Image: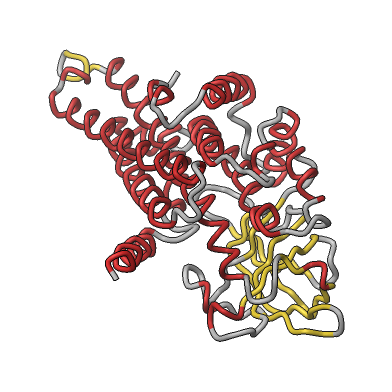
């Protein structure tokens, strides 16, 4: 079992420690899952997580970010696909939780029970981190909107039951003219243009919106609030990406500690070599530092902070970048096994890379942090 001493830090309450223990027991029994059919596995993981009650905190009026981070860290340590399945239930419904109408929030009962999968459709071929460049349009037509455009790299694309879609409604230039919509997967005009494959298999797709008509009731919040809604959702969930990276890093450290104790080199245990000890020390340092930043951001949000943009950006940037370093060191300590297909370290090496890109790439997080600092000075 991975080191759990961090649970005694003042960021956590007894309910968090209880949650961690219950989830750890569930993971030891239920994970990892086979990834031969990624779509079917994700659907079943959501169902099972819902039945076990672990999706309850992914949506609703009060989202406890520390709980989300603990769950993502634990799931990632056991199975990257399980973390992915859990994370999308929160990210995909975040806009509804924070800004949705009572009618829209009826979907949350289904997503929390694992009976419906959700997706967050923001990225486009021409706009990833630069949200203000969205090309998808939603033009007023009668009592609703006519949606046209394309989204790409959409997690749960093709298997989701509902999509939160961001489009340009034109209330102002750039980011000021965006709005958010709730789009059930059965809405006429939604097309799955392409299923996308990545180094770590996840259900991803390119979506098309072909003259899709949406009623006024599909609008989340108010017209022109799309950018604000997207940023508010990322404010809540961005630190959980750091938590997932932390889970991957903890698993890499655990496996490396076990390897160094059991492997012999030059007539001695690998762990007796000072250079190996140095690697292990660096890995442990990065894990703890990342955990402090992740749970600081989560705790700050849970204390009622309106925005934690800087804290979440720091947590996401540091945790994902350092997890990449930790896992790379684990590959080195495992030698050939570290790059052998099917080995846990090889799996972690593939899983971690995407986290430094989605929900704001590492370089973008640096811009976010710097702008936050400069704004405070001004």
The N terminus - image quarter: top left
Q: Is residue 215 above or below residue 100?
A: below
Residue 102 falls in image quadrant: bottom right
Q: Nearer the viewer, residue 290 or 311?
A: 311
Residue 125 horizontal/vertical position (percent): 55, 74
Total labels: the figure holds 0
Q: Nearer the viewer, residue 168 or 82?
A: 168
Task: Let me know if residue 200 appears in the view.
Answer: yes
Q: Is residue 169 above or below residue 333?
A: below
Residue 37 horizontal/vertical position (percent): 68, 43
Residue 33 horizontal/vertical position (percent): 62, 32
| 303 on left or right of 165 | left
Q: What residue is rendered at 53% in x and 57% in y?
A: 234
Q: What residue is rendered at 42% in x and 45% in y?
A: 297
Q: What residue is rendered at 50% in x and 54% in y?
A: 306
Q: What residue is rendered at 38% in x and 32% in y?
A: 252
Residue 166 horizontal/vertical position (percent): 65, 70
| 184 on left or right of 360 | right
Q: Nearer the viewer, residue 247 or 214?
A: 214
The C terminus - image quarter: bottom left
């Amino acid at each position: 079992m991975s080191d759990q001493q961090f649970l005694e830090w003042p960021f956590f309450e007894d309910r968090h420690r209880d949650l961690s223990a219950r989830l750890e027991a569930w993971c030891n029994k239920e994970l990892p899952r086979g990834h031969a059919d990624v779509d079917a596995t994700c659907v079943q993981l959501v169902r099972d997580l819902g039945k076990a009650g672990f999706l309850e905190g992914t949506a609703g009026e009060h989202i406890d970010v520390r709980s989300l981070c603990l769950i993502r860290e634990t799931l990632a340590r056991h199975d990257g696909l399980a973390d992915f399945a859990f994370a999308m239930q929160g990210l995909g419904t975040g806009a509804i939780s924070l800004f949705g109408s009572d009618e829209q929030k009826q979907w949350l009962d289904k997503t929390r029970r694992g009976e419906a999968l959700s997706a967050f459709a923001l990225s486009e071929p021409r706009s990833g981190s630069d949200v203000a460049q969205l090309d998808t349009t939603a033009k007023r037509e009668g009592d609703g909107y006519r949606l046209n455009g394309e989204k790409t790299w959409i997690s749960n694309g093709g298997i989701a039951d509902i999509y939160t879609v961001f489009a340009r409604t034109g209330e102002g230039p750039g980011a000021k003219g965006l709005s958010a919509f709730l789009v059930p997967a059965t809405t006429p005009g939604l097309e799955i243009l392409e299923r996308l494959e990545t180094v770590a298999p996840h259900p991803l797709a390119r979506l098309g919106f072909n003259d899709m008509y949406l009623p006024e009731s599909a609008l989340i919040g108010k017209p022109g609030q799309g950018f604000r809604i997207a940023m508010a959702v990322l404010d809540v969930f961005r630190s959980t990406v750091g938590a997932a990276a932390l889970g991957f890093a903890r698993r890499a450290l655990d496996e490396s500690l076990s390897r160094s104790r059991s492997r012999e080199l030059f007539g001695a245990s690998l762990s007796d070599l000072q250079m190996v000890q140095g690697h292990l020390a660096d890995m442990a340092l990065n894990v703890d530092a990342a955990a402090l930043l992740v749970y600081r951001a989560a705790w700050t949000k849970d204390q009622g902070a309106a925005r934690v943009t800087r804290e979440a950006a720091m947590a996401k940037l540091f945790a994902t970048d350092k997890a990449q370093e930790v896992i790379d060191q684990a590959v080195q300590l495992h030698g050939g096994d570290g790059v052998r297909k099917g080995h846990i370290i090889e799996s972690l090496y593939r899983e971690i890379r995407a986290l430094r890109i989605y929900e704001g790439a590492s370089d973008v997080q640096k811009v976010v942090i710097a702008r936050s600092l400069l704004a405070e000075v001004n």
